[in-house]
Image: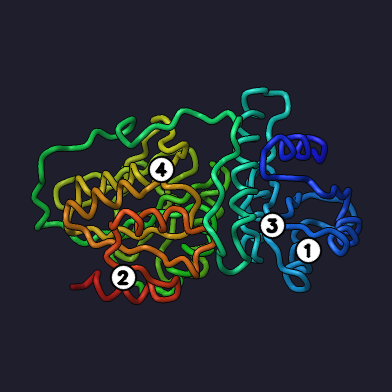
Amino acid sequence: MRQLLTEILNSASGIEVVGVASDPFVAREKIKKLNTDVITLDVEMPRMDGVTFLSNLMRLRPMPVVMISSLTEQGADVTLRALELGAVDFVSKPKLDVAKGLEAYSDEIIAKVLAAAGARVQAITRRPDKPASGIMVQEKYSADAVLSKSGSRRHFRTTDRIIGIGASTGGTEAIKAVLSAMPPDMPGIVISQHIPEAFSKPFAARVNSQSQLTVVEASDGQQILAGHAYIAPGNRHLVVQRDGARYICKLNDGPPVNRHKPSVDVMFRSLAMNAGPNAIAVMLTGMGDDGAAGVGEMREAGALTVAQDEKTSVVWGMPGEVVKRGFADAVLPLNKISTHLEQIAFT
């Protein structure tokens, strides 16, 4: 695994692997000697587990860390704990016998290491670099691949408020911070966080345990109720549909949009089409631009829009793109977003 990561990272322009360690004790000594910008850290290591090492590292010498995790429910719990401790992001271990999967993994790890290099543990210092040249990338689809944009304006007067939240890098902690500060009578909330299939259910359970809201992994046909938050399952798009005066969750197995599944653009488009001015769009920290076009569509349909500010974002890619395009009605630090949503949701 160390050899594989070294080969992948050294193949990218702008990245140099300056050290490799077989366990945390070796890593500790190399960190003292090397001027490291980013560390990739395996969850499972000999002599000391990755989370314990990360906890010590963030206490004694904080720096950007990208976790390497197995795609299991147990791996999800450990990885979510690592993100709580300050890891910037994570990638799952590839299936080494599948060449296509390895190619996709190479693109992901390079992009996330470059993004981590542009982030501080608490606040980003610059925009993330573009993916290195020469790296194979998947074809990029827009939300049109999943949900056709409706040309007609619907009537929304009989339906309650609904809040849509999109996030990626740093989003698990940002979502938890926003939801945990909300009162239990908030309008229904739908969430698309870029997360693997095995991680979404444990993530929902983790947020639910720290919130007055009922937080669940969304299921197909589920009614969206006030006081509840619905997190898109990994590897499924979350689409909001109308059923009379009710909103319901529909799960869509279409292609990745903006190379993500779930995609924030898909969810926001469905809110623009089915909730219009009754909706609120919230864009939290994340790498890339998924969701920016969707925020624009929601704003055009009369929705209010909110973007997290640069100072409190782990990576100001997604919210920064919303601001850059002029789609944000409000740009707020993370600790102000819940109060703002509470104010505008009941007006």
Q: Residues within 10 Å of mark 2 (few under 14, many from 20)?
A: many
Residue 237 percent across, percent down from the top left: 39, 40
Q: Are marks 1 and 4 in contact (CB under 8 Å)?
A: no
- Which residue in the protein does label 3 denote? 65
Q: Is residue 43 above or below residue 109?
A: below
Question: Left or right: 76 with respect to 189?
Answer: right
Total count of labels: 4
Q: Amino acid at mark 2?
A: Leu
Q: Secondary structure at mark 1?
A: helix
- Which residue in the protein does label 2 denote? 341
Question: Left or right: 92 with respect to 150?
Answer: right
Q: Is residue 113 above or below residue 49?
A: above
Q: Residues within 10 Å of mark 4 (few under 14, many from 20)?
A: many
Q: CA distance from mark 3 to mark 2?
A: 31 Å
Q: CA distance from mark 3 to mark 4?
A: 25 Å
Tell me if residue 271 can be seen: yes
Q: Are marks 1 and 3 in contact (CB under 8 Å)?
A: no
Rendered image: mark on residue 52:
1
Q: Are marks 3 and 2 in contact (CB under 8 Å)?
A: no
**Mark earlier in primary sequence (3, 2):** 3
**Mark earlier in primary sequence (3, 4):** 3
When asked about the image quadrant of residue 141, the answer is top left
Q: Secondary structure at mark 2?
A: helix
Q: Secondary structure at mark 4?
A: loop
**Mark earlier in primary sequence (1, 2):** 1
**Mark earlier in primary sequence (1, 4):** 1
Front position among marks 1 and 3: 3
Q: CA distance from mark 1 to mark 3?
A: 13 Å
Front position among marks 3 and 2: 3
- Which residue in the protein does label 4 denote? 263
Q: Are marks 4 and 2 in contact (CB under 8 Å)?
A: no
**Mark earlier in primary sequence (4, 2):** 4
